[in-house]
Amino acid sequence: MGKELEGLFGGLRRGLSTRDVMTVLCRAEDTEFSWRHFTLVEQDGHILAGLCAFPTDAHPQMMKRLPGCLQKDCGIGTGGLAKLFLRSLLANFVHRNQQSAPGSLYILLGGVFPEYQRTGVARSTLECLFDRARANGFRQVSLHVDRKNHAALGLYRTLQFHETPSKALLRRVLMTLALD
């Protein structure tokens, strides 16, 4: 999913990389989008991966607050926000909350940067998230994944995620994991 992160956040402002955006969002102390919802995986000062997860009922409010956070903390202007909005529509991020599993922790986006893929980083990051979700009383985790992302689908299936019937979401599949 490194491509998904790059496709969403890449090029929003000249000189601002996807890693820069993820770092700002994950470390922000005073915004709705902050360390409370983002997780960065770092090793020796290098960002390997990142993800954003939150309760399903928080999604609409958070999506409304994202533009302000990006403007304030990343210095992204109107043009960059317009790009992000169009990209999120195309990726179907904006309305995913309508079909995510109720009462679950929802993974809005996540990815491992290409040079760190297939090293166990994704599995370890997700297992850590599952432990935190259980500790906070969530009974399940849900996410959407591109039907053509065979590597991600394979990983999710080995972690015991199951496809959940949902309305057609272009090429996305809703997957859920029970946290027993």
Image (tube, rainbow, N blue to C red):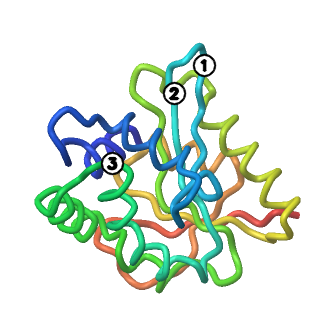
Closer to the N terminus: mark 1 or mark 2? 1
Mark 2 highlights which residue?
48
Position of 133 with respect to 47 (left or right) is: right
Mark 3 highlights which residue?
74
Label 1: which secondary element: strand
Closer to the N terminus: mark 1 or mark 3? 1
Closer to the N terminus: mark 2 or mark 3? 2
Q: Is residue 111 above or below residue 72?
A: above
Which residue corresponds to the image point at 34% horizontal and 51% vertical from the top-left?
A: 148
Q: Is residue 108 above or below residue 117?
A: below
- Please, what is the three-letter code of the amino acid marked with disc 2? Leu
Which residue corresponds to the image point at 30% horizontal and 41% vertical from the top-left?
A: 6
Q: Position of residue 44 (x, y in %)?
A: 59, 13
Foreground residue, 34 or 55? 34
Q: Can you tell which mark lies on residue 116?
A: none
The mark closer to the camera, 1 or 3, is 3
Q: Are marks 1 and 2 in contact (CB under 8 Å)?
A: yes
Distance of mark 1 from mark 2, alpha carbons?
Answer: 7 Å
Distance of mark 1 from mark 3, alpha carbons?
Answer: 23 Å
Mark 1 highlights which residue?
43
Q: Position of residue 25 (x, y in %)?
A: 47, 49
Q: Position of residue 156 (x, y in %)?
A: 60, 50
Q: Residues within 10 Å of mark 1 (few under 14, many from 20)?
A: few
Which residue corresponds to the image point at 35% horizontal and 67% vertical from the top-left?
A: 68
Distance of mark 2 from mark 3, alpha carbons?
Answer: 20 Å
- Please, what is the three-letter code of the amino acid marked with disc 3? Cys
Label 3: which secondary element: helix
